[in-house]
Every structure is written in structure tokens, then in C-alpha cells.
Image (cartoon, rainbow, N blue to C red):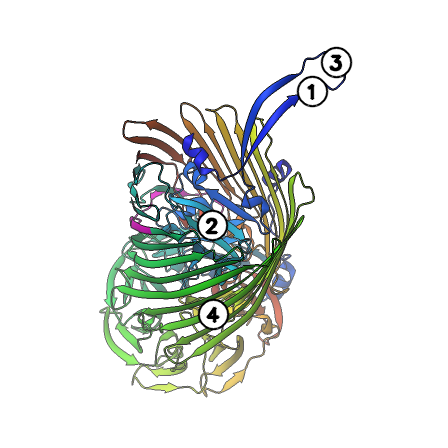
Amino acid sequence: MKSFAKKMALVSAVCVTYCCSPLYAQDTIQTKTLKNVTVTSKAVSKETSSTTPVQVLDRVKLERINAVQLSDAVKQMSGVVLKDYGGVGGIKTVSARGLGSQFSTLAIDGIAVGDCQNGQPDLGRFIVSELDNLSFANGQPDDILQPARVLASGNVLNMQTSKPVFDDKNTNLKFGFEAGSFGLMHPSLKYEQRFGEKLHMSLQGTYIQSNGDYPFTIYYTQSKTDSSSRERRSHSAVRMTNIEGNLFYNIDDHQRMTAKLHYYNAFQQLPGPVIYYSETPGSESSHDQSGFLQLHYINHISPRWDLRVDGKMYAVQNIYDDSAYNGSTGVLHNEYRQSEYYLTSALLFRLNDYVSFSYSTDYFYNTLNSNVESCSDVERHSWLNAFSAKAYLGKVNLTSTVLYSLHTEAVLDAFAKEYRHFTPYFGVTYKPFKNKDLRLRYFIKQNYRLPNFNECYYAYMSRDLRPEKAFQNNLGITYDFRPVGKKLHSLTLLLDGYYNQVSDKIVAFPSHSLYMWSMINIGRVSITGVDAKVAADLMFSRYLSLSLDATYTFQQAIDVTDEKSKTYMHQIPYTPEHSLSAMAFLKTWLVDFGYNIIYVGDRYRLAQNKPETLVEGYVDQSVILSKEIMLKYGNLKLQAQVLNLFDVQYEVVNSYPMMGRNYKFKIMYDFY
Amino acid sequence: MAIFVAVSFSCKKEPAKEEVQNVDEIVEAEQGTPVKYIYILNEGTWGNNEASLDRIELATGIFEHNVFGAQNGRDLGDIANDIQLYGSKMYIVVNNSNTLEVVEPESGRSIQQISEGINQPRYVVGAGAYVYVSSYSDLVYKIDTTTFSVVATCNVGRDPEMMAVVGEKLYVVNSGGLDNPNYDTTVSVVDLTTFQEVEKFAVGTNPTKLAKIDNERLLVICNGNYGNIPSSLVVLNTTTGATEKLPFTCTNLLINNGYAYCYDFDWSALTAVFYRLNLTTFAKESLVLNGSGDIACPYGIAINKGNGNIYVTDSRNFLSNGDIYCFSAAGAFRYKCECGVGPSKVVMW
């Protein structure tokens, strides 16, 4: 397919002349000279060459699983635990390798998207359907020309904006409309315009609406063997709008600038957990609005020097309402406002063909204020400095970063706090054979995460909270096989074993009553795990191809805080020991067919693992059918998807049932 | 890879086996009492539907987890806040499920689940042919124990909690907890003949618990505002309305035989002090319970009137299942059992 080829980054085109020559002089087989064969291959993927494990879902893969919200795509990755409260609107957060969600950084084009109040923004609010790629790196991404903030993370989930491609026209226009079960309506639009050679613009808008009134079965005992009833989720409607504008300006041969303006608005009814016997109708709702402006400048000054400067301004407002609050006001109306100003600059110096250094410095300023009486206004200044080195020594590649960070925090009532950290990273890959893409890799990293504002200032008596610390180790083997002229177009194998430790883990417990919680640093967690991935692309003919991806994760994340505690050596909450995901995509001349399966094993909802705290594992399968038709003025794509094919009743978080079988139908029209 | 997959599907990790049953210790410790069952109510945490009722059968020493679920084919619900024995029945208030369960104490079976007309119930107390339930809707429900329906409501102060009946009067503390930091400071007096609030006494900030000393006086625990106003322990004279603030603080108490058995938990040091108050002299006597140092966070206190055993439940900060500790009247450690999440109340039948 034309577009398929375009998406491949063509780095090397190999021309092969195949000659068949007799093995034995006395053999009478005639020699035959075959035609020249052109073999094109893409560059060895980041997934196999990186010193840290990284998983990439490119544009093609994101389309194949019909990933719209970021959470749809994250589910497919290995080593992650996605916490999902159900439906389109339910809050979704991700935690990787047992570290906890606060150690994961979300980034857009390398610029972190923060949330100082909760620590991680709701993944449901990011639209991934038009991205160039989504990548998830444990440790840190390999590239050393990066903002220090990204180099300071435990792991990074990066959304890369796609650059518009104009064939022989100046305008690209694409409409989409999706409708689905339980009132799902999702129109989308993408408009790209070229203004001469240097200036490009893209504009996209997405609107998602859903009633979320799906049926579910409620079991009245933990063992799920006794009484049950069939109910319907109510008060779950959600409406969200996502608008984004991008400007791409190629100043000259070595300078480039991009600007991004983003606006998000969502209104959600919050159904809350399913409570036995209670007929109290839902009364809580949430209204979120956020906007940011992000600027990026890159200058390849000379063959030795690269400079990048990024800036960002960000504002978020969250309003929480409860229309049936039992307090004397009768209603609850809490407003929270966050803002961030961020400036980062990174400089890369190539000493020679083998060694390069970089220095990266970040400054960001965060504020949080609220109308809630007991919540003081908070502000934080952060300054990060990272010095990195990278060496390519033939078979061995080394990357190392040393990061120094300083944060100062102040609360309106004059309480002030300071954090200083010095955190190192070291990674190495070893490629023993010249002709085989087989690599061994190892990385070691130490980093921290600051307590978020909720934990520190909005909980009771928790101001002296210390940051959590994480120590990560990873040992892996990667293999990339691209045979020439065979049906198997490519095969990728990734196998990583890791050992992590979290200390000073922040744990919540009720003080005084169940309505007043405090936070303390008492946890220590020890995590051992394995992440495995297999990906294969098979080309049977020009019109028939099969693509397979499968991941498996084994995770043993155990509490090792206190030997005498009942939770000692128990698996930490909501972390399955086994999980796997797989997707298969078959392209035929008639129709394209995709299949997706996610298996998450048993988990425990409490730190103490007992039969009554078990949340059963589940299997979620979906199928997708799509067809592209070339019409007079554009390309029409029709798509039908059935999710949770076998209507499995499951929960990710206890008391929050997930959607059973549901359908989505999509039409997209791409003008020529 | 295939091996991994096969193993993952066939292996289901069993949680580590917990404590060995200590039946002999229990039988030994519980001699000399007509009590047949010790019921323990586990609150559970919000939104998890994990409230449960456990019981110890004293004759055999067997600990039965979640007897309510086992007997009724359904669990209690979300946040079980109070349990009381009244008449021949046991009443369980399930706060977040908005229900009142009427349970047969012999079996643990629910005779009736009352949910009609009940919102955010907190505590229950019986008097005459009725049981009274306080509610965060700022009122008290009057429930007929034969028809199991709410027959009347009475408006009291803000966010009422525990109640006590003295003669024809019902006393209820008004905490105002949902309006924090603007707590309520009063005790409402409800005349049971007219079922109207007749008076309010000021006692201190955020009163949450109370107990009857005698026909004239109540002991009230005020939690303060968790900031500049500390908690206090107050004696309220119901005839005059006068209050006397005692020179010590208390988190929870139980009145038995002229004494108030108390514990005070220090939230910053995370340690508890046990003592008892002589209710005639209000002299404080220390109460030494051997082994109580293991208790992470005491959450409930009870006494077996038959043999004088003292029980303290440990919520373990809701990070895991709680425990119940049994001490002899002299303070010797007798036994300990693991309960559910947040064991808060103990009743004996």
C-alpha cells in the first residue's frame, strides 16, 4: 500500500544480485542469473537497539487497535499496570514495573505533562489517534538531547506529534465519525495546510460523548458464588473536547521551530463505586479544562553542536461538584487550579564519531490553589541539571547521565520545604555479532519522585513527607531478524529481566476516622519481573500480510517493609503476577481483520493477600474489521469493532465494573 | 515464551497460610461466662463493600470469619458502623449501603434488611418497642421493631453520631463532621414520648461518642478540630446542662461496673495508653494490658461481664486485616485472633 511504504523510514536500500553457481564442478545443473532484486529495510527499530527497554506503537499499530484515548494504547504494553475505573470517563492511570504511577512521566514531544496535585494526569484525556508514535521507555529514552525532566523519570510515556506530509497538494483534510454502544459519539477532524516550503500547519479536533449506561452483574459476596443481580451503570455520562493546533517552521537548513496550542474540556458525571444495596443516585461530577502552549526550537549548529530549547505554559482547572452532599451546605463545590511555566534547554557536543556529551537544564514553576478552606495555596520551583555522555565503541554502546535537582516548595502560611537530589543513570548495550542484530543490554538507575501536593498538603499532618526513591536494574536481550526474500518480513524478540526497589514509599492510612487520611513514608517494595515481547510481520503476497505482536509480563512486587507485619512478602495491591497482551492483524485484498486479546491475572485489592481480597483475573478480547475504498475525491475507510467479545464481566478496580460487550462503527474520509 | 504462557495459565498462587487456630487458648480463657458468641463487626474501607461480621464460639473456641455472608448468601455492604443487641435481636447499621440489618443472634441470619427511607445511618440504640438510628441527614429515625419500618424522624443537630437512652430521653452527639472545620459542639436531647428535640447542651468541639454514667450524667468524647482545638473528655449533667472537662483525653471508652475503661491514642507518636476512670471520684487508674504494645491502632474496646475479660480490637491502620486481643480482668494476655478490615465493635450474646 502506498501509505504503508511511506510510513517506513527508508534508511538503506540494498541491491542484491543473486547468482546461482554450481557447488560441484561436475554438476550438470545450468547456472541461472536472476534479475536484480531490491530489498528495502527500515532502520533497526529503537526497540531493539536502545539501552533501555522501549516499546513503540507507531501510527499503523495505533490505527489497527483503534486506539483513541491514551489508555487504549497503554493497555497493550508489557510491564505496565493500567488502573481503569471503567467507561470512557473513568480515571485511568498507569504504573510500570511496580514503581507506582507517580514514577511515570507523560510527555508530548519530550515535554513533560505534569500534574502536581495528583502526580499523574488522567490518561483518558489524551487522544492518540493522530500521533506519529507512542513510545514507552523504562528508565529513560536513549536520546541524550532531551530535557532534564525526562532524564529524571522512572519511565517515560511519550506522545510524538505527527508532522504533516503533503504529496503534491497544499491541503490535507480528513473527517471521521465514530458511533458506538451506550451513546458513544465521536466526530473528529484533521486539517493540514502548507504555506510554502517552510511553514506547515495542522489543526485537529476531537469530540467524544458517551452515556456510559452499560449493564453489569453485581455479586453480593466476595467469592461471587451466591446472590447476584443485574444492574445498569448510571450517572456516567461524559463529554470531552480536544482541540490542537501545530505550526511547523523550517527556518533554514539547520534550524527548526514548532509550536503547539492545545485545549481540553471535559465534563464527567462520576458514578462512584458500586455500593451494595444503596439506591442513592449519583450526585458527583467533575469539570476539567486545560490549555497549554508549547514551543520547540532545534538548531543543528554545526556537525559537532546541537542545541534545543523548549518552553511551555500550562493551566488546568478542575471543578468537583456534589449536588447531594450531607453537610449543611447541601452541596460541595471544590475548585482546583494548577499552572506551570517551564523552560528547558539542552546542548549536545560531538567530540568525535564515537563520543558525544550533552548538558541539559530545566526550570519549572508550579502553583496550585483551591477554594477549599483546608487546602492552602502551594508553589514549587524546580531546577534540574543533567550531564550526559554517550559512547559508540563498535560492539559496545554506553550511555550515562548524572542529574542534579533542586526543588523548593512554599505554602501560603509560610511553611517551606526544599529537596535536593543527585541521581545517576548508566546503560550499556553489547552487540556480539556484526551480522546479527542480537544485543545484550543492561541499565541501572536511581531516581526519586516528590510527594504530590495532595499527599503533602491536602492530607492530614503530612507536610514532612519525604520523596519516594526508586532503584532500577534491567538486564535484557534483543533480537531483530529481517530475512531477505522470505515470507517472514521481520521478527523481533525482546526479553528483559528486572529488579527494582522502592523505598520511603508513601502510604495512606486513616487517622482519626475513615474521613481523614494521613500519609507517611513507610513502605519498601522489592520488585522482580520479566517483560517479553515477540513481534512478527509476514508478507504472503502484495495483498496478503499478517502482523503479530505479543507481550508477556511477570511481576512479583512484594512488600518488604516490616517483617512482623501481616503484609510482609505479600504482593502489593492491584499488581497482577502474570499478564499478557497480543494483537494480530491480517490485511487482505478484500478486508482487513484485527484481533486483540488482553489477559490480566489475579490481583489483590489490599496489601494483605487473602481470598477475600482477591480481584479475579480476566480476559478481554476484541475484533476489528476495516475496509478502505478509493472514491473519486478521497479515500473512504469503514471500520467495525466489537470490544469485550465474550461479554466478560470484570473489574480492574474493585467495585468499578467494566463494560461488557460493546460495538463501535467508524467512517473516515481522507480527501486527496 | 510458550513455556511462560503455559505456566502462567496453570499457576494460581495461593496466599500464604495464616495463623493456626488457637481454639484451646480461647476455650480456656472464656471459662465462667454464659456468653455463647462474641461478635466482631468489621467496618471495612469506603467503596469496597468489605464490611463483615465475625464471631467466636466460646464453647469450642472456633473463630468464624464473615458469618453474615456465610449465613445469608450476601455480604453486609459498605462501612458497617454500629452493632447493638436489643430485645432478642441484633441490629447492624451499614452506613454507606444505607441499610439496617435485623439479625438473629443465634444463627447470624438476617431477618430483615431495612433500607426504605434510610439515608447515611450511623448508630443504633433501642428503647421500648423501637430502635433509633442516627443519620448524617441531621436526624434520628424511629423504627418499629415489629413492622421494621421507619415510623417517624426527628431533626437534631448536624451529623449526629452516637446515642444513649436515659429514662424517657434520648441523647445524641452532633459532630458536624461533614462541615469540617466548622464542627458542631452540642448534644441534642430528644423526648421519646413526643419524639421531638427538646433541648441542646453545649459540650465541646466535634463530639463523637457518649456513654451513660448514671441517670443524671453522661460522659462525652469530643475530638476537637484536629488543629488548634484539642480533643476533650467531658462529663455532662443532663439535669443542669453543666459540663465538666476532665483533665485527660480519651479516644474511646466503655462503661462497666462504675468504671470507664478508656484508651487514648496519640496520632503523632502512634502509641496508645490504656487507663480506667473511677466514675465516683474520677480518679485515673492505669490499666496494664500485657502485650497491648503490639496493638498498632486500637479501634474498639469491650468487656465480657461474665468473666471480666477485656477485649481490644486493632484496626492495624486499615492496611491489612485487624485483630482482636483478649486480656483477663487482671490484664494478662489471653489470646488474639485475626478479624476483617477495621474491627470496631464487639457485642456478646
- First in sequence: mark 3 or mark 1? 1
Q: In this view, does A561 lie to the left or right of B124?
A: right
Q: Which chain carries label 1?
A: A
Q: Which chain carries label 2?
A: A
Q: Do labels 3 and 1 share a chain?
A: yes
Q: Where is residue A356 in the image (x, y as percent from the top left)?
A: 58, 58
Q: Are marks 1 and 4 on the same chain?
A: yes
Q: Which chain carries label 4?
A: A
Q: Is residue B106 left or right of residue A669?
A: right
Q: Which mark is residue A21?
A: 1
Q: Which amino acid does label 3 sit on?
A: Asp
Q: Which of B41 and A347 is in front in this view?
A: A347
Number of residues whose C-alpha sits closer than 10 Å to that of mark 1, classed few (under 14), some (14–19) or many (20 or more): few
Q: Which chain carries label 3?
A: A
Disc 1 and disc 4 in contact, CB within 8 angstroms: no
- First in sequence: mark 1 or mark 4? 1
Residue at mark 3: A27
In the displayed structure, A71 sits above or below A331; it is above
Residue at mark 4: A383
Q: In this view, does B130 lie to the left or right of A380?
A: left
Q: Do labels 2 and 4 share a chain?
A: yes
Separation of residues labelled 3 and 2 (CA atoms): 63 Å
Disc 2 secondary structure class: strand
Residue at mark 2: A82
- First in sequence: mark 4 or mark 3? 3
Q: Position of residue B228 (x, y in %)?
A: 38, 82
Evaluate whether residue A466 shows in this view: yes
Separation of residues labelled 3 and 1 (CA atoms): 10 Å
Residue A245 magenta-highlighted: yes
